[in-house]
Image (cartoon, rainbow, N blue to C red):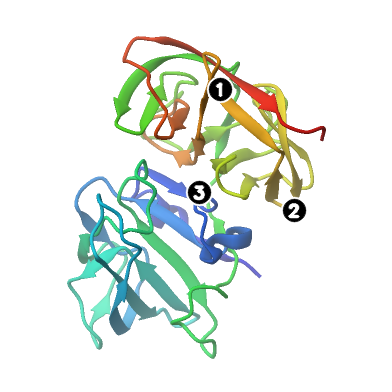
Amino acid sequence: MAVTVPPDVLHQYYRFSLYNSPFDAHDEGCAIDLYPEGPRAPSPVAGEVLDTKTVQAPPKPYAAEHDYLILVDTGDHVARLLHVKPGVEAGDRVAVGDDLGELVRAGFFAPWVPNHIHLGFRDANANPYRAAGSLPVAAGVDVAPLAWDGTGTVAETGETWARLDSPAHPAPGERFVGLAAGNGRADREGGVLDGGLPHYDWGGALGGENGTAHLAGQRVGVADGRTVTWDDITVLANGEPVTGVALFCSRETAGVKLVGEGVDLTVGERVEVTVERQSSP
C-alpha cells in the first residue's frame, strides 16, 4: 500500500515529482522529490531523528562531493531524506515544517535539476540504509491536467534548460498542475505526466492508469498502472533534438521545461516541440 503525503505537507513546496529521476529509489514511484523555495529544507515529516549519515555522491563538476541521509521514525514508517546537510542529529524530534538543514546540490542530480528534498518510506523492520526498497508514495492532492499543443515562447533559460510559457498555470499558488497525459486534452482520464521524457527509462501518469501517454497529442508511451514505459522517441525543439522534457507537478508556474546540453534557445523565441519516433509502437 502506498504512503500518502498529505496536502499540508505538499503545499510547503512549489513543485514535486515521483518519477523524474534515473535512480532505483524512484522505481514505480517509490520516492517523491520536494522542491522548497529557499536554501533550507522544511521537514515533510514529523517524528524522531534516528540517524544522519554522510554518503559519497557521484563526481560532477557542478555538485558537492558528498550527500547526506537523514532517517526519521514517523511512528508508522521510517522516512529516508536525502540532499540535505543535516542541522539535526539522532534523538532530535522534528515537526512538519521544521528546518532540517541546508539543501545540498548533489552529484545525483542532472545539471538541469534544482535543489530538492528526496523523501521515501520504509517499513520499520526494513533496512533504511539501502537505496532501493522503499514503499510506493502517493501525492495527497488532486493535480489538474493542462492541455498543450506543443508550442510556446521561451520564458526563461539556464545553461542546460529552457522553460516555455505554455501551457500557463490557471491559478498560480492555489493548486498543483501538470501536463495532461491524455491525447492533447485536459481531461482526468489519463492523469498528468511525470518524469524525464525520454531520458529516463520510465515516467509516470499520476492520476491515470493503464493508458497510452501522449505529449502534445503524440503518443510517447504506455502505462502499466501509473508507471509509463516511454516509447523509443526523440524530442525536438524547432526541429533540433534535445535531451528531453522534464515533467513534474507545479504549484507556482507551469510551462514545458526542455532540458539537455544541446538546448540552445533564447528568451522570446517561439518554439514548436515535436516527437520523432525511432521505432514503431
- Helix or strand or loop: what does disc 2 sit on? loop
- As drawn, the label of residue 51 is none
What is the x, y in percent for residue 186? 64, 25
- Taking depth in this image into account, of 240 and 269 the one nearest to the observer is 240
- Helix or strand or loop: what does disc 3 sit on? loop
Q: Which of marks 3 and 1 is in front?
A: 1
The 10 Å Cα crowd at callout 1, few under 14, some 14 to 19, many 20 or more, is many
Q: Nearer the viewer, mark 2 or mark 3?
A: 3
- Helix or strand or loop: what does disc 1 sit on? strand
**Three-letter amino acid code at the position of disc 2:** Gly
- Residue at 30% x, 64% y: name it: 43
**Three-letter amino acid code at the position of disc 3:** Asn
- Taking depth in this image into account, of 279 and 118 the one nearest to the observer is 279
Direction from residue 266 to residue 276 in the image, left or right: right
Which residue is the site of mark 2?
225
Give the quarter of the figure containing the N terminus.
Answer: bottom right
> Can you name the residue that lies furthest to the right here?
280
Direction from residue 189 to residue 169 in the image, left or right: left
Which residue is the site of mark 3?
20
- Residue at 37% x, 31% y: name it: 161
- Against 245, is 3 above or below? below
Q: Distance between the residues labelled 3 and 1?
A: 19 Å
Of mark 2 and mark 1, the one earlier in the sequence is 2
Q: How far apart are marks 2 and 3 (CA)?
A: 17 Å
Q: Which quadrant would residue 42 be assigned to in this image?
A: bottom left
Q: Which quadrant would residue 159 be assigned to in this image?
A: top left
Q: Do the residues labelled 2 and 3 touch (CB within 8 Å)?
A: no
What is the x, y in percent for residue 214? 69, 30
Q: Which quadrant would residue 272 be assigned to in this image?
A: top right
